[in-house]
Amino acid sequence: RTSVVLNRRPTRKDDAVAIELLPSFTTPAHLADWAREDLWPWATSTTLAELLAKCEQLDLIESGACTWAGHADAFARPSLSFHMLVRLEDDLAAQGYHLQALPVVALHLQLVQAFENEHIRSAVACLARMRLSRFAASCRLHAAADAAAAKWIEALKALPASFEAFEEEREQVRSQRAGRGAEPLESDWIDLGSGPAGGRRSAPPR
C-alpha cells in the first residue's frame, strides 16, 4: 500500500490527511478474490486515478505515462481484445480452469472502459458479469456469484432497448452478406407464443 498525504493548502501540520492508496496494478491476494469486484482496487477507488490526473495537469508526470493492464489506453484494438478474451475464457472453462479464468474476466470488465459507445459498454459489461457469475458458481463461490448476477440481471433487462442503436452496423452486415449472395439476416427474436412459457427470446447467432 502507498500512503499519500493530500492537502491543497495546509494551515497546520495536523491538517494533512494521510490516505491509504492501493495501487491500481496491485492484484488480489488469492485467486478466489478475483470473483469479487469489491476486492479489485482499480474498480473500487478512483483516488489514485484522480491523483495521477492532477499530476499530469501540473506537469509533474508526462501525459499518458501512467498506464497499466486494464487501463483504457492499454487496449489499442478493443474489439479484437474482446474476442480474444472471450476465446481465452472459453478455452479455460472447457478445461475446467474456472478459477484461473477469473482474472481474465476481471480484465474483460476493465476492457469496457476502452469502448466509446455507451451501448457497447453496457453489452460488454453484461456479458463479462454473466461469465463472472457462472465461473464463480462453478468454483462454489456462491456469494460472489450472487453479487455478479444481481448486476447482470438488471443490465440484461435494459439491453433490448439499445438494439436500435446498432441499426447502422446491422445494415453494413446485410450489405456484406448480400454481396456474397448469403441468406438475409434472421430476426433478433424468437416468438414463443402465448402461455406461461410464452414471450420472446433472443435468437441464437448463426
Image (spheres, helix red, strand yellow):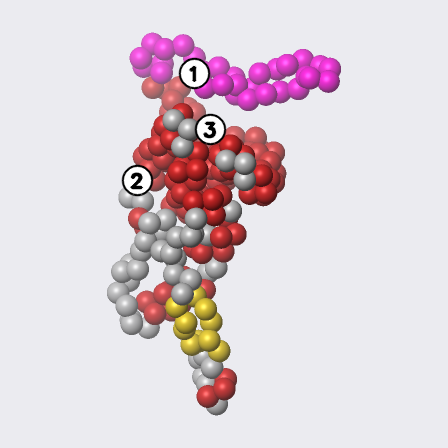
Foreground disc of the pair 3, 1: 1
Secondary structure mostly seen in the magenta stretch? loop
The magenta span reads: 177-206
Side of 173 relative to 144 (left or right): left
* Pointer 3 residue: 167
Residue sticking out furthest to the bottom: 12
Image point 60% across, 36% down: which residue?
153
- Tell me if residue 202 is in the magenta stretch: yes
Sort mark 2 into few (<14), some (14-19) or many (20+) by Cα contacts within 10 Å. Answer: few
**Which x, y percent locates residue 101?**
41, 37
Residue linked to disc 2: 77
Query: Which residue is rendered at x = 27% and y = 60% of the image?
Result: 65
Mark 2 and mark 3: Cα distance apart in space: 22 Å
Pick whichever of labels 2 and 3 is earlier in the sequence: 2
Element type where label 2 sits in the image: loop
Amino acid on which the number 2 mark rests in the picture? Arg
Front residue of 163/126: it is: 126
Q: Amino acid at mark 3?
A: Glu
